[in-house]
Image: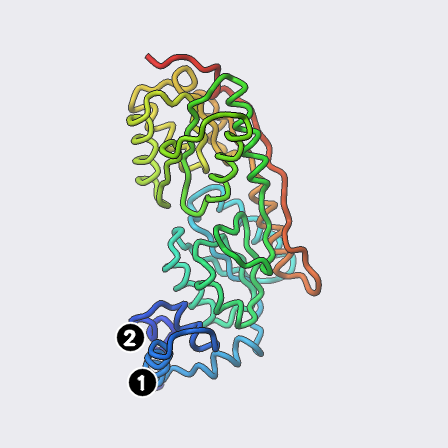
Amino acid sequence: MNGSGQRRTTIKDVAEAAGVGVATVSRVLSGGSASAGTREKVLATAARLDYHPSALGRNLRRRHTGGIGLLVPDITDSFYARLADGVLSCARSYGEPVTVGVTGDDPERESELIGTLIEQSMDRVIAVPSGDGEVWDPVLRAGVNVVFASRRADLDLPDVPAVLADDRDGVRTAVEYLTGLGHRKIAFLARRAQSQRVAAFTGALTALGVPVEDELVVHARASRDSAYAAAAGLLQRHPDVTAVLAGGNILGEAAVLAARELDVRVPRDVSLIMFDDVPWAELCSPPLTVVAQPAQDIGYRSAELVLRQGRRPREVVLPSELVVRASCGPRRPRR
């Protein structure tokens, strides 16, 4: 039993004690699918810890606390910082507070944060999603108003509205520009949950008659160290690559650093295009060609959607733009 001077039991406490994920606890307590053994274990643990799912259900369905929960992978990434600024700007005009959580592109961390938002009876959530439908199903079952921003990842949740940049057009334009300069060995540096950009990349190559080489699509985890390792490994293992498309600004930064340390000259040896037009891209030597996305607008429009009453569009797609600078040049044989 929890005395008046003790900390209240949380959904995370139940998950840890039962040896399951927060998403599983949420699913069981909201009446979702689970095996009989798992359901019995979760309910028994909740009872032992004096955790009251009925109170949780009342809070989720009846008590509206206001405010917006915002989940982003990395607040130090300038793209997500600008997206968050857009959310904050819109929310401020409505007088709504915003609670920000950082997932690190880790589904387990995302699941924990969703559990925290449930605990706080947050009834509006904007997320750059990392997890799958199992992570998000409990919060959707509970009637929380969710809008995805920037990506849907691999989620099969068509009823959840999303505000996206036109990734397909951005990737296609970048690949067409590089192939127009004569490049055929083009690599893609991708971050977790960028499957849509990867698909657009391989589709663009195929449409242009350029062979798709699986080993030239390199994935990095959501950290600068992982991004650098991926970029350096790519340039070392594939010296015949003449162009690189980086799927985000942290990956682009890693490609610039790796090329400099490996004495790979941009654009003489390797042409480089990066997603996200961040301030340092124009100050880089040479200034980087980028696929610019309206990060702040994505955040603002996401907040508008999550605060809107009544009918909402399933998807809002905002244009991306290729900004040509000096980091790309004609294909030349590598020495």
Q: Position of residue 190 (x, y in %)?
A: 42, 39
Q: Position of residue 131 (x, y in %)?
A: 43, 57
For this rendering, which residue is in front, 291 or 76?
Answer: 291
First in residue order: circle 2 vs circle 1: 2
| Residue at 34% in and 28% down | 257
| Residue at 31% in and 30% down | 232
Kindly state the secondary structure of the residue where label 2 is placed: helix
Question: Does residue 8 show up?
Answer: no
| Residue at 68% in and 59% down | 312
Q: Position of residue 83 (x, y in %)?
A: 54, 47
Kindly check if marks 2 and 1 are in contact, taking CB atoms under 8 A apart as contact.
yes
Give above or below for 134 relative to 286: below
Binning the other alpha carbons within 10 Å of mark 1 as few (below 14), some (14 to 19) or many (20 upward) gives few
Mark 2 lies on residue: 17
- Residue type at mark 2: give it: Ala
Q: Position of residue 113 (x, y in %)?
A: 42, 63
Kindly state the secondary structure of the residue where label 1 is placed: helix
As measured in the structure, the alpha-carbon distance from the residue carrying label 2 to the one carrying label 1 is 10 Å
Res. 65 image quadrant: bottom right
Question: Does residue 227 show up?
Answer: yes
Mark 1 lies on residue: 48
Give above or below for 107 relative to 122: above
